Image: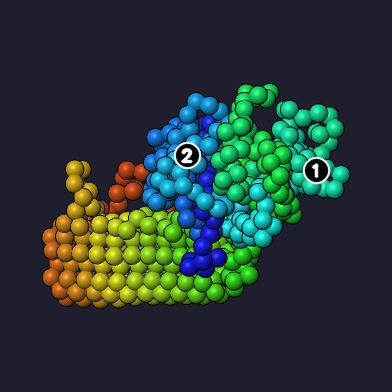
């Protein structure tokens, strides 16, 4: 639906239930699949049809749920359900709350906070069917093989809908009906308001059933209809963790398929998990066992995976990210990350740069073309362009109490196992020798050396480790070398490279 077009007068999302079968300290609707809470998906579907008002009914864990809802949708009206139980009561208090601001006229849609696969597209078709049929009530139904637990759609001999019978209140004959109530409805506001005053708690569960409105509407001469959806996943709720994971897998299957249809190659959809909040460009390739979460984006021609998990990571065009665990990071165009790389928040890798095997990075900006190829840690640092950080380099950023910054210029070449004891700065074009411990700033173009000279203690093995393999081999080697004195002279020089 285009933003200018007018949606229904209101959508009411029911989210007051406890969800005891989840066996969780977290309220059911706050459990997440596909990168959003279940109620987050419900709000997105509701907002997608542009309702004039949106009401969310809460009761269980009220403050925690309300805070989450407010953060997702500050415009929505949060309504507290009182102690009278049932879906009918939930809608009654919501309608009263909306009416208190200004009377609701027209179509009121009711959905659930625990039905996460429902789409705006289906909701929109549903509202259109309700309005073009001039119905008093329309219910979204589905035909299931096993209808146990659901309310059943009652129809007369002509097929006209006459009401809904809850499973617990149903006769054997009614229980044989396989067309079920999804719990999603469109009502005429005036009729809904009027009917709810007549709904009682006179049933097996002692609740005010919203479903009773259908029979009341039919009795009052209103048109009551059911729209049957073929896509049962869209009306399925999650009551326990088994259903939650089944819905999560189906949502993922749909997300991955939709990206493939938009031009993304996914080698193994079964092991690829993409949150509904992720964005991918055409010609991205996703290799097996890859999980993309949160606000992650991957630009054209980038290759991600295998065995990679990225959360809130921006991957530039043509970059490769292999066997990497990353979050809160940015990878530049044509850059390379991995294999076996851990990117922590605040890592910004410039275009064509590299963070290679067994590197951990955090809060570091790396300029264009700079490479940290193997075995190290870079944290709280800034590295210029076209710098090569040697194997095994470490920024020692933590003095035991505080974190300090390392600043390394452009065109720098550091020797293997250089340690930067922050705060410290290395100027443009500077070099360091292998094993250098950089405690003081290094001026541009200087070579920093900090090791003591190497000293060889001749014959140490023969004296201290006699009769070992080492001693035997050393004895053989010494016998084969004509002049051991010249050899000694050359190796006593300190070696720095
Ligand atoms: C309800 C329907 C049933 C339908 C089924 C579909 C009624 C009487 N029955 O049954 O016909 O087949 O959904 O899933 O409506 N809620 C509140 N306040 C309450 C009670 C529930 O907000 O007092 C909310 C829950 O959080 C949940 C939804 O309403 O999101 C449905 O509640 P639930 O108790 O699961 O309804 P069912 O008994 O399954
Ligand atoms: Mg119930």
Q: Secondary structure at mark 2?
A: helix
Location of the N terminus by quadrant is bottom right
Q: Is residue 392 left or right of residue 65?
A: left
Answer with the quarter of the image where residue 311 lies: bottom left
The residue that appears at 25% across and 61% down in the rendered structure is 381
Nearer to me, 300 or 1? 1
Tell me the residue that label 1 is attached to: 155
Q: Is residue 344 left or right of residue 212?
A: left
Q: Quadrant of ligand 1?
A: top right
- Above-or-below relation of 481 to 203: below
Q: Residue 63, image x and y in percent?
A: 39, 35
Mark 1 to mark 2 CA distance (whole Å): 31 Å
Q: Residue 244, image x and y in percent?
A: 60, 42
Tag count in the figure?
Answer: 2
Nearer to me, 378 or 70? 70
Tell me the residue that label 2 is attached to: 96
**Residue 453 at least partly seen:** no
The residue that appears at 61% across and 38% down in the rendered structure is 195
Nearer to me, 374 or 192? 192
The residue that appears at 38% across and 41% down in the rendered structure is 67
Q: Is mark 2 within 8 Å of ligand 1?
A: no
Location of the C terminus by quadrant is bottom left
Q: State how the image is colored.
A: rainbow
**Residue 228 at least partly seen:** yes
- Above-or-below relation of 40 to 454: above
User: Mark 1: few, some, or many residues within 10 Å (few <14, many ≥20)?
Assistant: some
């Amino acid at each position: 639906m285009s933003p200018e077009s007018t949606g229904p007068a209101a959508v009411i999302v029911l989210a007051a239930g406890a969800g005891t079968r989840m066996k969780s300290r977290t309220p059911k609707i706050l459990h997440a699949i596909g990168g959003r809470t279940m109620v987050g998906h419900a709000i997105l579907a509701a907002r997608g049809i542009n309702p004039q008002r949106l009401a969310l009914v809460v009761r269980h864990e009220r403050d925690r749920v309300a805070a989450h809802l407010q953060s997702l949708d500050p415009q929505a009206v949060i309504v507290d359900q009182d102690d009278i139980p049932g879906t009918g009561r939930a809608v009654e208090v919501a309608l009263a709350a909306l009416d208190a601001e200004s009377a609701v006229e027209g179509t009121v849609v009711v959905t659930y906070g625990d039905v996460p696969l429902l789409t705006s597209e289906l909701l929109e078709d549903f509202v259109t069917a309700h309005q073009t049929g001039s119905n008093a009530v329309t219910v979204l139904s589905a035909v299931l093989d096993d209808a146990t637990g659901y309310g059943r759609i009652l129809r007369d001999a002509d097929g006209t809908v006459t009401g809904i019978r809850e499973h617990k209140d149903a006769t054997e004959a009614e229980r044989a009906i396989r067309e079920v109530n999804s719990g999603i409805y469109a009502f005429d506001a005036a009729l809904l308001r009027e009917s709810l005053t007549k709904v009682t708690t006179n049933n097996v569960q002692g609740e005010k059933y919203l479903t009773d409105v259908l029979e009341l509407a039919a009795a009052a001469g209103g048109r009551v209809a059911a729209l049957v959806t073929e896509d049962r996943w869209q009306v399925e709720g999650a009551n326990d963790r088994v259903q939650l994971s089944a819905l999560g897998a189906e949502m993922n299957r749909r997300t991955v398929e939709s990206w493939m249809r938009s031009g993304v190659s996914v080698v193994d959809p079964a092991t690829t998990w993409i949150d509904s909040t992720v964005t991918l460009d055409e010609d991205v390739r996703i290799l097996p066992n890859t999980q993309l979460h949160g606000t992650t984006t991957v630009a054209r021609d980038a290759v991600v995976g295998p065995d990679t998990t990225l959360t809130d990571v921006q991957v530039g065009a043509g970059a490769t990210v292999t066997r990497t665990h990353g979050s809160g990071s940015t990878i530049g165009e044509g850059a390379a990350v991995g294999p076996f790389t851990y990117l922590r928040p605040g890592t910004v890798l410039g275009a064509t740069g590299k963070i290679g095997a067994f590197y951990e990075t955090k809060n570091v900006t790396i300029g264009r073309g700079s490479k940290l190829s193997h075995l190290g840690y870079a944290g709280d640092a800034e590295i210029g362009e076209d710098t090569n950080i040697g194997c095994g380099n470490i920024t020692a950023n933590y003095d035991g109490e505080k974190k300090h910054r390392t600043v390394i210029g452009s065109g720098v070449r550091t020797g293997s196992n250089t340690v930067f004891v922050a705060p410290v700065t290395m100027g443009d074009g500077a070099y360091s020798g292998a094993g250098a411990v950089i405690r003081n700033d290094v001026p541009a173009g200087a070579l920093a050396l900090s090791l003591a000279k190497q000293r060889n203690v001749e014959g140490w093995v023969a004296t201290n480790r006699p009769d070992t393999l080492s001693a035997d081999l050393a004895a053989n080697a010494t016998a084969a070398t004509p002049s051991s004195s010249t050899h000694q002279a050359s190796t006593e020089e300190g070696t720095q490279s």
